[in-house]
Image (cartoon, coloured by chain):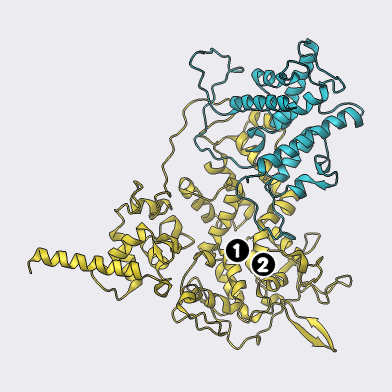
Amino acid sequence: MSHQAMRIAQASAAWLAALVVVLTASAASARPEAPRAFCAAYPEAPNCKGRLVTCAQCHSAVPAFNPYGTALISALYADGAVDDFEAGVTAAVTRIESDDSDGDGLSNLEEIMLGTSAGNPLSHYALKPQPAGENPGYAVGKWDAAFAYKRVMISYCGKSPTYEELKTIRAAADPRAEVHDALDACLASDYWRDEGLARLADNRIRPLKAIGLKGVIPLADYDWDYRLFAYVLTGDRDARELLTADYHVDADFNRVEGTIAKDTTSPMDYGPQPLIPEQRAGMITTQWFFVINTMFSALPRTTAAQAYRAYLGADIAKSEGIMPVANEPTDVDGKGVQAPDCAACHSTLDPLSYAFSAYDGIRDVLLDDRPQSRNGQYNPTRTPWGTDSVLLGKAVPNLRAWAEEAVKTDAFARNLGAMFFTHGVGEDPGPAHQAEFEALWRSLDGDGFSANRLIHRVIDTDAFGVP
Amino acid sequence: MQTLTKKVAQGAASLLTLTLLSGCPAPEEKPTPSPEEEPVVTASVKGQLKWKRQDALAADLSRALALGEDELCKEVGRYDCIDYVHKVALGGNEPEEAGQYMPLAEPGASTPIAVERVVFAACSAAAYADREVRAAPVAFWGIDLNAAALDASDERTREGASKNITALYQSLLARDPLKREVDAVLTLMEDDAGQGVSGDTFAVLACFTIATQSEFLFY
């Protein structure tokens, strides 16, 4: 066979192999290590900083590939079978980075570095031209104090500025400083504490009146959660205490140490916060958090997933934060999660969850012939497996260590930054604001993780203050 | 009422046109404007505004119309429109009973009509309070709310209304109106048949026109 014929035969074989992979791809072939492999090649990509890409990077709807995924598979198997899939993916993505797999005019590498999808032509970004000309109301294209002031007042004080207040800002010698002063006042207001922050907490706390303190079957009081959330995120306090606090916050917004005993007027027959401080880890160890998430689960996967989603920004249900651990899942509770359909996610989720096993969700014990609730209490003998967990590739022996490791991660900082960026700007950080957004969440460490200081930085961004 | 509604829509549309960031004159006109009357308005290229949701909407209407937030709008006279009945459509969420942990990301299909319902109710409540409850009018002090039919050609009537419209712009939009904007709202004094509307009707329509502009509802 001639040399050219051999090359044609080899290329055809590679295409045929890729075609076979594409056509026979199923959940049984799920490769959850692919996001990690992708980000190993592109650590500076926006979707790889403080997070991992999701399966949507290559898949339109798992297991079907999008154009980028199809191109990647061809590149991966171009030379035949691959021994090390992760290393193979890391190498293969660079081979196709100059291509434009979705034909939208941007190369795959350009899209990866913009944060748009290289497999979807509708995911696209074009830099907008700078506006030229005058506007009597606002300095379009530049940070405008009046525009920013109005946003500050509505976003953080819950009301628009008055005619006189706007006049004052426009006439001020240092309008930007005035806007920051206004922000300080708003961040100290009842509105921000009781409404603004509370609405940011809803999806993290997930209240349910029916089983709250005022419900028909009171199991736990989530008002403690709302107060802790607001307390940690106000007053220049350290936001890492969202996961490390060993105290509570009472109705007068005062810090309270230790456990919270039963109130004689409480409809519950136990104290509202019975967990000892030594086993506390902030918001993910309140009684309500265990009641609503763990409930009766032996292995609290829902609890771990909610902690991962709420405080590290990774929603496993959306294939975010998939970092499979070798030899997992071991299916400790016999739920069948080792099945290939399940293991793709459970190889991350199960090792994430072991640390939560030592805490009761909803549990009654008989004392003096009377049922007594032990909801949300520490119970190290609760399950036969231990609490050794793996969080973002790091081994952690228990939940306190889980939390302490979590707050050190880029994922925690990024998630906190994203929460306040999206709230302030009104949309998720996109290609136009990636640099500003990254600078924001990376500033947290230097600012002592103060949410207030972060918000001050948010209002200074072009995303917030440029009309 | 139908012709009045049409007039309001026309008035609102012309106001929207004025306030939208566009500066192209019609081909047959070549205005030489003064900056105050015909400002050159360069458009934003970002096209990104935030939606004023229910809590700020209520706070702003309450302050501008000097009403308590619980006086702005009630369905069947009992249920708060903004904080209860139309809360979700107006951008809020109800986490404890409805289990709605996130509000709508963007205005929904029923948001416009819910906004209009609330604003109309609030403006009507303010007109009623000025006419029947308060010792002296607070929101519509420049309009004779007891007039059965306003005389749009009467200078004193127009002057009072103009000043009141300016005050509404200041309280709702925190700025002074252009003369053209005032003139556009003044046209609401007459119906399509050229007949003067009542003072009460004009007050509500003027308030509604200004408070349903994009400028009031987005930021």
Q: Residues within 10 Å of mark 1 (few under 14, many from 20)?
A: many
Helix, strand, or loop for circle 2? helix
Chain in cyan (letter): B
Give the number of marks: 2
Left or right side of B139 for A287: left
The picture places residue A190, in percent across and down from the top left corner, at 76, 50
**Residue identified by numbered label 2:** A283
| Above or below for A191 versus B141 | below
> Which residue is located at x 80 percent, y 41 percent?
B73
Q: Chain of mark 2?
A: A
Q: Nearer the viewer, residue A367 or A244?
A: A367
| Above or below for A177 versus A30 | above
**Label 2 near label 1: C-beta < 8 Å?**
yes
The picture places residue A37, in percent across and down from the top left corner, at 38, 67
Name the quadrant containing residue B218.
top right
| Chain A, chosen colour in render | yellow
**Residue identified by numbered label 1:** A310
Q: Nearer the viewer, residue B16 or B136?
A: B16
Three-letter code for the amino acid on which mark 1 is drawn: Ala
Q: Nearer the viewer, residue B32 or A27?
A: A27
